[in-house]
Amino acid sequence: MIKQFLQKVFGKRSLSNDLDSDPAARRGKSSAVLVIPASKHKINHKLISQAALKTCDGLQKAGFQAYIVGGAVRDLLLNHPPKDFDIATDATPEQVHKTFRRSRIIGRRFRLVHVLWGQETIEVSTFRGHHQSEGDGETNDSGRIIRDNIFGSIEEDSVRRDFTANALYYDPKRHEVLDFHHGVADIRAKTLRIIGDPVKRYQEDPVRMLRAVRLSAKLGLKLEQTTEAPIRKLAGLLEDVPPSRLFDEMLKLFLSGHAIESIGALRAQHLHHGLLPLLDVVLEQPLGEKFVMLALKNTDERIQAGKSSNPSFLFATLLWHEVLQAWLENQRRGEPVIPALHAAMNEIIDKQGEKMAIHNRYTATMKEIWAMQPRFEQRSGKRPYALLTNPKYRAGYDFLLLRCASGELPEELGAWWTRFADAGTEERTNMLLPDSSPAKRRRRPRKKKPAAGNGESA
């Protein structure tokens, strides 16, 4: 019924006619595809990156097929400015690289080409073939694809896409959308549907389960029943995902602008267990859950307002209560406050790395934010002045305010630092608290030893 309706509204044509008439289209033939013209899809051409248009144009002039594909087309249909533009083509990575002087071939699991246009990078992939075909492909014992450089036709490529909403191809030259799996109908029905057998597709790439949760929350799409059903049962497959891939996907999820909805969906699908060690326990603790939700709400509001959000700050908040618990435990064992904190930081970062490798460039800043927290409780002498000059002061201060807002620390402490930062010299001096730390013993100067004689008598 849906198929007949879409064919009546948008039109149906055999893609093989175009392939036969177009010398550039020489890979495979499709029996049918829904071809949606500009008058129906109403994509705003102004939302399309010039770099993406130039990449498609360059490939087409070189005799290849080239389409804007995936999430960018989905977002264009929803009238959302896409964050990234990906291109799919029948050109091999070597042919793409030869076509564009400023480009580079990347990846081993999937070989891609990054085409560089000024500050913008366009990712170009070759149409994927069936993984069972002969070629440079490999799966492990659980069915996860660990190498996939098997090329095929555009129809085969559409089958390899994860969700119907992402299996859409836009030809900027003809201004047409090619829809192989009724993705447009699903988008309009607010449905997220996986292509093919859900169990097999999740086994091929367990990250698709996280992606389903993220896209559902971000786009307000309801997971189709058969797409959702196996997720809870297959959650353990995420244990087999390389930590770096897991980190990249979680970063997209938490920086989607809909992190709170994503956390709720993660918990509903039992996908949060083990992603961040003991995150599920933290979320069940009153102070821990309030602190994390405040941090995610802050991040969502910044992103939805078009502002940037620092991943270091976000992951520092997500792991803070693990660090705090280890810090207190170290102090109970008799370690001094600061060494106990540094030991706790290293312990949690190492523990986290076993599941989801956070890049070193983020962990360094996370540690700086955590290390500042005891210093905010020192409000006497020269210590507050020194803290204000710390390059990461603002991040540490924002972190302090979250701790105060969640009830972990008195709100008076955050208010004091807010006032102190904006106060003049005299007011700051009056705000300082008496120094209650033990007086340091002055070290007596060491007596100079007499110079050794040269052995000669006077």
Image (cartoon, rainbow, N blue to C red):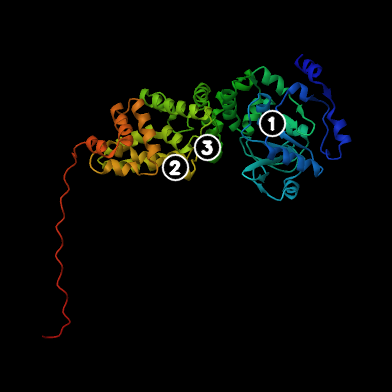
208 and 202: which is toward the camera: 208
Question: Which of marks 2 and 1 precedes in the sequence?
Answer: 1
Question: Which of marks 1 and 3 precedes in the sequence?
Answer: 1
Which three-letter amino acid code belongs to the residue tagged 1? Lys
Residue at point 71% right, 19% down?
Answer: 185
Give the foreground label among 3 and 2.
Answer: 2
Measured along the vertical axis of the image, is residue 204 above or below residue 108? above
Report if the CB atoms under discs 3 and 1 are less than 8 Å apart: no
Question: Which of marks 2 and 3 precedes in the sequence?
Answer: 3
Which three-letter amino acid code belongs to the residue tagged 3? Phe
Task: Kindly report the distance in space between the C-alpha atoms of the residues bearing marks 3 and 2.
Answer: 13 Å
Q: Mark 1 points at which residue?
A: 46
Give the x, y percent position of residue 354: 47, 40
Task: Kindly report the distance in space between the C-alpha atoms of the residues bearing marks 1 and 2.
Answer: 39 Å
Q: Mark 3 points at which residue?
A: 247
Q: Mark 2 points at which residue?
A: 363
Give the x, y percent position of residue 335: 27, 42
